[in-house]
Amino acid sequence: MEFDQNRAAKPFDVTLLDIMRGMGRAIKRWHARRETRKILSHLSDAQLRDIGLTRHDVCHKSE
């Protein structure tokens, strides 16, 4: 058996660049949700009802 075959595999193969990219994607998603909530909060209750939402949905949904 060769040395490389006997060595344990790395449990995680994540680089700092991968972590930074993940953080960047998370910030972009957060910003998009924030902007969507901001736009929806300016709609009237009737307009929200037309698209199947309530004021509570706009203010309290985390996704």
Image: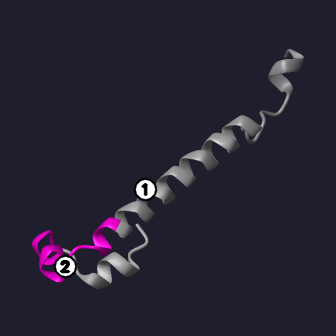
The location of residue 42, given as percent across then percent down, is 28, 73
Which x, y percent locates residue 53? 21, 75
Write the residue at 56% across / 54% down. 27
Asked whether the viewer can see residue 13, the reply is no
How is the rendered protein coloured?
one colour
**Quadrant of the rendered image containing residue 60:** bottom left
Give the left or right position of residue 3, taking residue 51 as reference: right
Is residue 42 covered in magenta?
A: yes
Q: Position of residue 33 (x, y in %)?
A: 42, 61
Membership of 59 in magenta stretch: no
- Amino acid type at circle 1 is Ala
As rendered, which of 44 and 50 lies closer to the eye? Answer: 44
- What's the distance in space between the residues labelled 2 and 1, CA to CA? 21 Å
Along the line of sight, the residue nearer the viewer: 6 or 17: 17
User: Which type of secondary structure does the marked residue at label 1 adopt?
Assistant: helix
User: What secondary structure do most residues of the magenta stretch adopt?
Assistant: helix
Q: Which residues are magenta?
A: 39-52
Q: Which residue is mark 2?
A: 44
Residue 42 appears left or right of 4: left
The answer to which of marks 2 and 1 sits earlier in the sequence is 1
Disc 2: CA contacts within 10 A as few (<14), some (14-19) or many (>=20): few
From the image, state whether disc 2 or disc 1 is nearer to you.
2
Q: Is residue 4 above or below residue 28?
A: above
Position of 27 with respect to 33 (left or right) is: right
Q: Quadrant of the N terminus?
A: top right
Residue at left 18%, top 82%?
45
Q: Residue furthest front?
A: 42
Label 2 residue SS: loop
Residue at the farthest top position: 2
Q: Where residue 32 is drawn, which disc sits there?
A: 1
Disc 2 residue type (three-letter): Ser
